[in-house]
Every structure is written in C-alpha cells, then in structure tokens.
C-alpha cells in the first residue's frame, strides 16, 4: 500500500462536528437514553427515602446522615459525606428535569425542540452528581496530577490496542467521563446514604453498648456497604455501557466494543477513587500504617489494569455478547452472568484481600519492601485473577471473531467497488502488515503521511465492519450508511493522494514504501 503526502493539506473536521456525526440523535435513541437516566435517578431516590426514616444512633444526628460531619473532616468527610450545596443541587436538578419532562408531555413540541429539551433533561438530572468527583479532584490537585500519566497510558492502550474497527475516540472519552463523573458521583452519593441507613438500623441501641460491641457493629455496617457499593457501581457501569452502545453509531456491537467501553468507564472511576484514597491513607498513615505512596503503587501502578478497570471490562464484554445474541433469553443470561461476575469480583477483592492480608501479615513485617512490592499487591490481585482470566478469554475470542468478520467484509467490499482494492486488502486483514506499512510511511513521508494512511485504513475497516453488521439487511437506511462510508473512504483517498494501484503485499514484517 502506497501513501504520498497530500498536495494540499485539508483541515480535519471540527471536533464538535465529528462528535455530532458520531452520535445518534433520533427519537428512539433519545428515549432509551432518557430511560437510563430515569432509572439512575430512581436508584438515588430509593436510597434517599430510607435514610430519612432511619433510627438515629446519636442524639444530635442531622435529618440526613450525609450531613453528619466525620471526625477530622478532610478526606474522611469526602468519603462519608456529601456537601450540602451539592445535595441541594442534585435535588434541584432532579426537580427541573421532571418539570421539563412534564412540559414536553403537555406541549408536545416539534422534533427540534424535543431534541433540545431531552438533552437538557439528561444534563440537569445527571450533571449535579458530577460535582462530587469534581470537588475531590479540585480539592487534591497534586494527587490528581500524579494519577494522570498512568490513566492516560491506559486510555491510549484501549484506543490503539484494537486491531479491527476501533471504538471512536469520542466514545472512549465519553465512557471515561461517565465513569469519573456519574459512576463515582452517583455511586458515592448512594453509598453514603446507605452507610447512614444501615448504621441507623444495625447500630440502634449501641449508645450504651461496650466499645467492642460498637466496633463489631461498625464492621457489620462496612460489610453491608461494601456489598452495596459493588452492586450499585456495577449497575451504573452497565447503564453507561448500554447508553453508549445505543447512542454511538458506526461501530461494531460485540464483546470487544463492550470490553473497551466498560474498561474506560472503570478507568474513569478508578482515577477519582485513587485521588481520594491516596489522600485518605496519606492522612491516616499514623493510625493504620498505610501510606499514600502505597495506595498509589497499588491503584495507579501494579494494579492499574485490575480492580474497577478489569470488572468494568468484564461487565462490558458480557453486555456486548448479550447484544449479539439473537434470542431474548440468551441476551438476558449473558447480561446477568456478566453482572453477577463483575459484582462478585469487586466484592471479593475488598473482602478476601483484607482477610488474606490479615492471615499473611502475622508472619511478615508489615510495610517492609517485600510486603509493599510483592506480598500486598499479590494478595490484592489474587481474588481478581479468575475474573481477569475470563476477561482475557473474551478479548481473545472477540478479536478472533472480528478478524474473521474483517476478512469477509474486506473481501465483499473488494468485489463491490474501488473503496478497497485487491492490493489494499492484505494490509487491512493483517494487523502486522498495517503496522509495518505505517512505520514505512512514517519514515518516508513523516507524521502527516502516516496519519493520512491511518485514517484511510480506519475508514476502510469501518466499511468492512458495516458488511458484518448488515449481513441480513443492506437496504434502506443501511444502504445509505454504507454509501456514506464508501464516500468517506474515497474522500480520504483523494485527500491523502493514495495511488490507485498500490504494489502487491510484501512478506509480513517487510515495510512497504
């Protein structure tokens, strides 16, 4: 495949225009998105009402437990409480969203106004939850900046590690934002309420109990909250994966897409959680022996691809498999199995790793280099190992299915027209050939030539993916989509100055000029 630099550089489309083109904006997609938002808000309200009627353990407890000031404040308060301004903003957003929906129901506006009102409803109902992680990040900027390099590397890996038909970068960034803002914000708000509710019912009458009984009660409360947080986070990650699969177009809906999107959501959550826990354990190191540096080592170094990233990937892959199932029963079984596995893995990581650590640390020095570098990371990753293995198997199987689909799609498109020629086909179905061709193009024509060739190959792979998605139906809107993808490929060819008859494919590993 030959690529020469364009004679006249053409500016790339504006990011906002490209984002709008990638997002579905029809009534069906907006309706499903609004349904997901309503369910998320309903989940929060279901947490709020029991907290209002809980028994009060202390005589001076506020009406809502999230307004209780934690001893010492600071990062402990960020973990267990919700700022009053954020709480009232959340309630105001829910009320405004409900009023907008009522207005739409009564007035029945035209399509353009209905579209604007729907997106406004989604923004005002979910947006305030994002204030919780934003407060954490802005409160501790040094910890946040320390977490940027590792997080950016994993995002790069998720985007460039896909060998066929990449998930659009815009979709990946939205998934990351959903995890950082909505999953963390709404999940933390719900779990903070659950902590107060469970503590009220479990700890009722503890005011006159012994210290040991009170501590035992608090351990029971924390066990329930760990389970609650695992379930709520999995629900919100699943909601994000479904929402993005519904809203974004021009991509394959399979195990690999779901895995990448779910991992990006988990990565966003992990960023904010890491900032909070690095600060929290750094301030409590004198009491529990853990340090902020150790938390950084666990969450942003050796275990960066574990934890929420791994379980988000597992859940997303299961939803992708469910989306491909033809029967409703198969879809339900795949989605519920993935949800149960991700939830169980998240809970086991917190519970079993702590139990194993308690057993092992009776025989080794806590905080020693051997413990910090090897033992503690191993004990944290050990409960996750079976789930990470299942995720890796799903990734391998999904990649093989994509490779077969890419071969079939490229072959079909080669016979259909000039968008993919016989000389280009071997490069598209072999990732190694594509890599060495890009490397050779970079050596001869620099970054501009390499980027032009990379965009062309990505568009051709999207066209091949279109054949897979529309094996049974290539008429009507599907045909229009295919024609649009072919037109995009031809524009990129003209823009990049690609030769109409590239040379035959070389032996794998040989760069082609």
Image: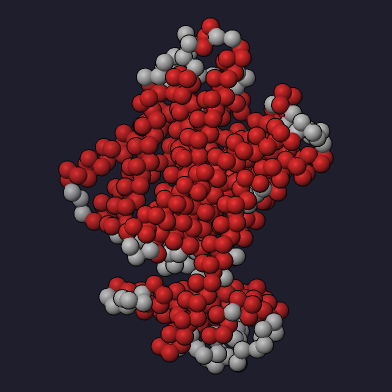
Q: Which residue is drawn at 58% across and 90% down?
A: 502
Instruction: Please report the residue visible at 71 percent of the width from the left and 45 percent of the height from the top.
Output: 378
What color scheme is it? Answer: secondary structure
The image shows a total of numbered marks equal to: 0
Question: Is 491 left, or right, of 426 in this rendering?
Answer: left
Q: State whether residue 10 appears in this view.
A: no
- Asked if residue 149 lies left or right of residue 164, the reply is right
Residue 42 visible to an observer of this rendering: yes
Which quarter of the figure is the N terminus placed in? bottom right
Residue 307: x and y, percent? 60, 46
Q: Percent position (x, y) of residue 411?
A: 47, 85
Task: Judge whether 122 appears above or below 162 on screen.
Answer: above
Above or below, 2 against 473 in this view is below
Q: Which residue is drawn at 62% across and 38% down?
A: 352
Residue 493 at x, y percent in the picture: 51, 82
Q: Residue 118 location, x and y as percent?
A: 30, 48
- Which is nearer the eye, 97 or 511? 511
Q: Which image quadrant is residue 481 in?
A: bottom left
Q: Which image quarter holds the C terminus?
A: bottom right
Where residue 273 sits, quadrant-wise, is: top right
- Please report the residue visible at 60 percent of the width from the left and 65 percent of the height from the top: 161
Q: Left or right? Give the position of 427 relative to 358.
A: left
Q: In which quarter of the view is residue 321 placed?
A: bottom left
Residue situated in front as seen by the camera: 211 or 49: 211
Q: Residue furthest top?
A: 208
């Amino acid at each position: 495949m030959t690529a020469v630099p364009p004679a006249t550089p053409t500016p790339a489309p504006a990011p906002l225009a490209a984002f709008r083109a990638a997002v579905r904006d029809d009534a069906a997609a907006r309706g499903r998105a609004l349904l997901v938002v309503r369910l998320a808000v309903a989940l929060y309200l279901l947490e709020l009402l029991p907290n209002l009627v809980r028994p009060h353990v202390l005589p001076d407890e506020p009406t809502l437990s999230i307004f209780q000031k934690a001893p010492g404040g600071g990062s402990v308060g960020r973990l267990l409480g919700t700022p009053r301004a954020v709480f009232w903003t959340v309630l105001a957003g829910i009320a405004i969203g409900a009023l907008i929906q009522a207005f739409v129901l009564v007035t029945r506006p035209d399509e353009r106004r209905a579209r604007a009102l729907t997106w406004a409803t989604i923004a005002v109902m979910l947006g305030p939850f994002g204030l919780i992680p934003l407060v954490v990040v802005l409160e501790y900027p040094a910890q946040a900046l320390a977490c940027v390099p590792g997080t950016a590397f994993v995002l790069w890996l998720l985007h460039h590690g896909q060998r066929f038909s990449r998930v659009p970068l815009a979709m990946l960034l939205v998934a990351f934002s959903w995890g950082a803002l909505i999953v963390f914000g709404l999940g933390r708000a719900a779990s903070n309420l659950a902590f107060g509710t469970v503590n009220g019912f479990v700890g009722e009458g503890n005011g006159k109990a012994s210290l040991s009984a009170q501590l035992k009660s608090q351990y029971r409360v924390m066990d329930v909250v760990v389970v609650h947080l695992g379930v709520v986070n999995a629900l919100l990650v699943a909601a994000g994966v479904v929402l993005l699969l519904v809203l974004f177009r021009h991509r394959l809906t399979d195990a690999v897409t779901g895995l990448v999107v779910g991992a990006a959501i988990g990565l966003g959550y992990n960023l904010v959680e890491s900032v909070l826990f690095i600060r929290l354990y750094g301030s409590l190191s004198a009491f529990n022996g853990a340090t902020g540096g150790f938390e950084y080592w666990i969450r942003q170094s050796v275990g960066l691809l574990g934890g929420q990233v791994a379980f988000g990937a597992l859940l997303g892959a299961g939803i992708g498999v469910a989306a491909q199932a033809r029967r409703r029963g198969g879809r339900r079984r795949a989605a519920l199995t993935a949800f149960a596995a991700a939830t169980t893995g998240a809970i086991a990581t917190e519970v079993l790793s702590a139990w194993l650590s308690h057993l092992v640390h009776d025989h080794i020095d806590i905080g020693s280099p051997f413990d910090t570098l090897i033992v503690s990371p191993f004990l944290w990753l050990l409960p996750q190992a079976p789930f990470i293995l299942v995720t890796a198997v799903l990734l391998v199987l999904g990649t093989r299915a994509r490779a077969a689909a890419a071969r079939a799609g490229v072959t079909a498109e080669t016979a259909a027209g000039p968008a993919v020629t016989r000389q280009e086909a071997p490069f598209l179905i072999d990732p190694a050939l594509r890599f060495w061709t890009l490397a050779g193009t970079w050596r001869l024509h620099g970054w501009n030539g390499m980027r032009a060739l990379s965009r062309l190959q990505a568009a051709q792979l999207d066209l091949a993916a279109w054949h897979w998605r529309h094996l049974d139906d290539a008429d009507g809107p599907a045909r229009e989509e295919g024609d649009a993808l072919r037109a995009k490929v031809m524009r990129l060819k003209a823009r990049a100055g690609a030769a109409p008859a590239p040379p035959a494919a070389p032996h794998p590993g040989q760069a082609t000029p």
